[in-house]
Structure formats: structure tokens, C-alpha cells
Image (cartoon, rainbow, N blue to C red):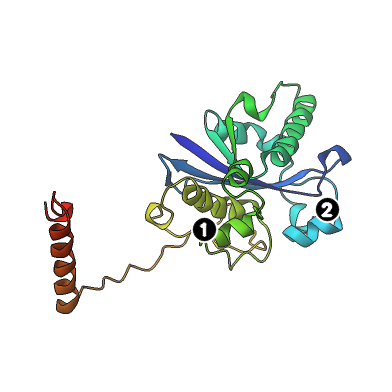
């Protein structure tokens, strides 16, 4: 099962007002395991970001000016997402922007790219969170706190960074493990990084702490007590 946790950054809140996508980030999960085969692109929106949006993502017009416009990366993006299950937080927002970009690229290139759902199915983690935690705050930051996902390095929003955090939240929220699935830590690259692909750093080896003789004796005593209290004995001794 191939899933892609997707997030975007944009020049503003409403695509109907001419705002554009400036970053796409996708984190790949295969059979609920992080593969680190990620997709991240900055995009020149050919317009300025609104002040409110710039305060959120910090991607300046000068920084984005040398990156390709959406029509240049559209086919690469479609091939990456094709056949996958997209996992998006507040999917309506991201899909609205991406479908608008596909429509604009269709007009410019004279090809019919359709909509995102022509290539993928979509899961909205905001809808899942609202079902699990009705009446509570269900922003990505709130979910990170609720599921003990470290987001201390999230000073600014970034599509790839937020997708990495959402991937860990999704695994925890849907009953899976988080750190046990990761052989390497999530990228903590800053928004000022001009590399096309952000690096993923390896975690330090886990320290193994052996149980003491006293702890082992206490453990055996507890198992013996469980066996004595149950007719079928203690399953951990079988």
C-alpha cells in the first residue's frame, strides 16, 4: 500500500483570489513505513505572497524567483502521485489549490491534466481528527502535542516539514507506531535552505539498558503472581 502525506504552501488563503502554490511536499509511506523517497519542490508563483502568508511560511519573492513555475514540474508531480493514496490535513484547501494549478497548466500546455482525484484517492486527517477528538483543537500543532510528535523545530510552516510531521501524527492517530517505523529521523532543514531536496539526518544509535538482577527477580515474581491468580496460568510463561 503506497501512501503519500502531502502538504502545500501558498501565496495566500484563497485560490479564487489568484493565489498560487509555492511549495509542494510529499512524504512516502509504503505499508505504513516511512521510505524517505520524498518529493519536494519550490515553485515560482509569478506573484507576490500576501503579508499574512509570508509571515507563516517565510518564503520570500526573491527566494522563489529562480525556481520553476508549476507547468514545468506538473508532469513530474503527477507521475510521483499517480496511483497513491494521498493523506492531507484539511484536504479541501490543498486540493483546491492543486486543482487550480492543474487547470492553469492544462490551458498553457494544451493538455488535459484533470484533477488530483483522477490520479489518487484522498484521506483527510482533519476529518479523522474531528471524529476522534470532537470539540477539541485539531490543528497540526495540536495533534503533534496530543500524539507526542516533536515539532519544536517548526518555527515556520514548510510543505515538506509539515508533511513529515503529519506522517508521524497519522501513524499514531490510526493506531500505528511512529518512531518504530523510522530508520532515520525526519528532516529538520530550515525554510532558508535552497537545496531542491532537503536532507534527512540519521538518528543516534539507541542505547540499550539491561535489566538489573533485582528487576529481573521482581519481573519473575510478578509473572508467578499472575499465573497463580489465573486458571489458565500466565501466557508470558508459555
Residue most extreme to the right? 17
In the picture, which quadrant includes the N terminus? top left
| Label 2 packing within 10 angstroms: few (<14), some (14-19), many (20+) | many
* x and y percentages locating residue 145 in the rendered image: 57, 62
Q: Position of residue 62 (x, y in %)?
A: 79, 58
Note whether 204 is above or below 90 in the view shown: below
Query: Circle 1 sits in a helix, a strand or a loop, which is it?
Result: loop
Residue that label 2 marks:
49
Q: Residue 76 appears in which quarter of the rendering?
A: top right
Disc 2 to disc 1, C-alpha distance: 32 Å
Say which residue appears at 41% left-offset and 65% top-offset. Answer: 203
Report the side of 131 relative to 94 (left or right).
left
* Residue in front for this viewpoint, 141 or 61: 141
**Answer yes or no: do the residues labelled 2 and 1 have beta carbons within 8 Å?**
no
Residue placed at 53% from the left, 52% from the top? 169
Q: Is residue 231 left or right of residue 175?
A: left
* Residue 147: numbered disc: 1
How many numbered marks does the figure carry?
2
Q: Nearer the viewer, mark 2 or mark 1?
A: 1
Name the secondary structure under disc 2: loop
Name the foreground residue: 208 vs 132. Answer: 132
Q: 7 left or right of 102? A: left
Residue 5 location (% of width, % of height) = 56, 44
**Residue that appears at 56% across and 51% down:** 166
For the residue pair 9 and 93, the one nearer the viewer reads as 93
Q: Is residue 57 left or right of residue 213?
A: right
Residue 154, can we see it?
yes
Q: Is residue 50 above or below residue 83?
A: below
Measured as percent of width and height from the top left, residue 72 is found at 69, 36
Amino acid at each position: 500500500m503506497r501512501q503519500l502525506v502531502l502538504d502545500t504552501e501558498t501565496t495566500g488563503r484563497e485560490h479564487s483570489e489568484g493565489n498560487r502554490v509555492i511549495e509542494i511536499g510529499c512524504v512516502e509511506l509504503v505499508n505504513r513505513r516511512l521510505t524517505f523517497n520524498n518529493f519536494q519542490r519550490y515553485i515560482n508563483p509569478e506573484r507576490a505572497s500576501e503579508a499574512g502568508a509570508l509571515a507563516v511560511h517565510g518564503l520570500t519573492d526573491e527566494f522563489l524567483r529562480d525556481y520553476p513555475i508549476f507547468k514545468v514540474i506538473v508532469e513530474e508531480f503527477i507521475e510521483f502521485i499517480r496511483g497513491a493514496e494521498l493523506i492531507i490535513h484539511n484536504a479541501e484547501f490543498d486540493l483546491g489549490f492543486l486543482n487550480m494549478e492543474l487547470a492553469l497548466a492544462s490551458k498553457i500546455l494544451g493538455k488535459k491534466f484533470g484533477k488530483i482525484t483522477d490520479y489518487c484517492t484522498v484521506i483527510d486527517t482533519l476529518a479523522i481528527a474531528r471524529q476522534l477528538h470532537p470539540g477539541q483543537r485539531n490543528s497540526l500543532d495540536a495533534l503533534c502535542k496530543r500524539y507526542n510528535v516533536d515539532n519544536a523545530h517548526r518555527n515556520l510552516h514548510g510543505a515538506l516539514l509539515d508533511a513529515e510531521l503529519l506522517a508521524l501524527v497519522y501513524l499514531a492517530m490510526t493506531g500505528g507506531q511512529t518512531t518504530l517505523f523510522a530508520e532515520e529521523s525526519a528532516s529538520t532543514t530550515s525554510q532558508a535552505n535552497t537545496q531542491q531536496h532537503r536532507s534527512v539526518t540519521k538518528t543516534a544509535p539507541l542505547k540499550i539498558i539491561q535489566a538489573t538482577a533485582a528487576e529481573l527477580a521482581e519481573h519473575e515474581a510478578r509473572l508467578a503472581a499472575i499465573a497463580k491468580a489465573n486458571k489458565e496460568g500466565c501466557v508470558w510463561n508459555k
